[in-house]
Amino acid sequence: MENGKRVNGYYLVILILALIIIAIGITFAYFTLAGKEEDDSTQIWTGTLSINYVDGKEIKAYDLFPINEPKLGDTTYVYTKNFSVTSNGTLDQTIDLYIDITKNEFVSNHLRYSLYDANGNKITTGGLPSSGKILMTSNVFLKSGETKDYTVLLWLMETKENQNNEQDCSFSGEFDIFANQIKYE
């Protein structure tokens, strides 16, 4: 009997030593990890962006006649698209604006575009190829809570040559806007 008590006592001592070693290991691991954690390592950054397409997201240009570059406000033979971009989150952002061309039956680069800001300042002008994404502007700063308004004009460029082959051609695409959140340190 005494031999059985001795075995039970032996297991009890082993169990207590094992629990002490486990407690020391957990404490060591906790303080090692807590000591390595940086001040901002657990922060989560979020931001939202909303886009208001005044007359829809899609671009469908038709009934275009060859003209020289129009001015903002011209309505004859010009396709006009207005949209707003708003930062609804708590973070400042930079945005990139693209035209994603899904269909362009016009001769490559005969269909032209101009992008204007809300003050009527021309940001960029360019030609539209038959397909792909065209970067209109990039790294535009958008402060938290701020809205930026844009107008895009599309027109068929007058080439001073016969452009009858571009009659009944159409263009379709949409705007893609990408935001990059700014993290201040």
Image (cartoon, helix red, strand yellow):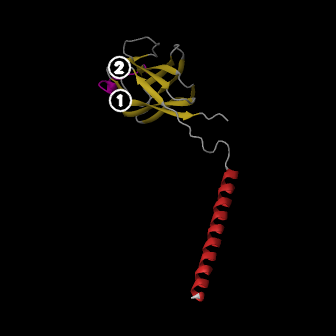
Q: Residue at x 31, y 20 (%)?
A: 63
Numbered label attached to residue 172: 1
**Where residue 172 sits: x, y (%)?**
35, 29
Q: Amino acid at mark 2?
A: Leu
Q: Measured along the vertical axis of the image, is residue 12 above or below residue 166?
A: below
Q: Residue at x 65, y 33 (%)?
A: 184
- Quadrant in the picture for the N terminus: bottom right
State the SS at label 1: strand
Q: Is residue 14 left or right of residue 174?
A: right
Label 2 crowd (10 A; few <14 / some 14-19 / many >=20): many
Q: Main secondary structure of the magenta part?
A: loop
Classify residue 23 by image quadrant: bottom right
Region rendered in magenta? 159-171
**Where residue 19 sits: x, y (%)?**
62, 68
Does residue 168 appear anywhere in the picture? yes
Q: Count every numbered label the image shows and give the total.
A: 2
State the SS at label 2: loop
Numbered label attached to residue 181: none
Numbered label attached to residue 64: 2
- Quadrant in the picture for the C terminus: top right
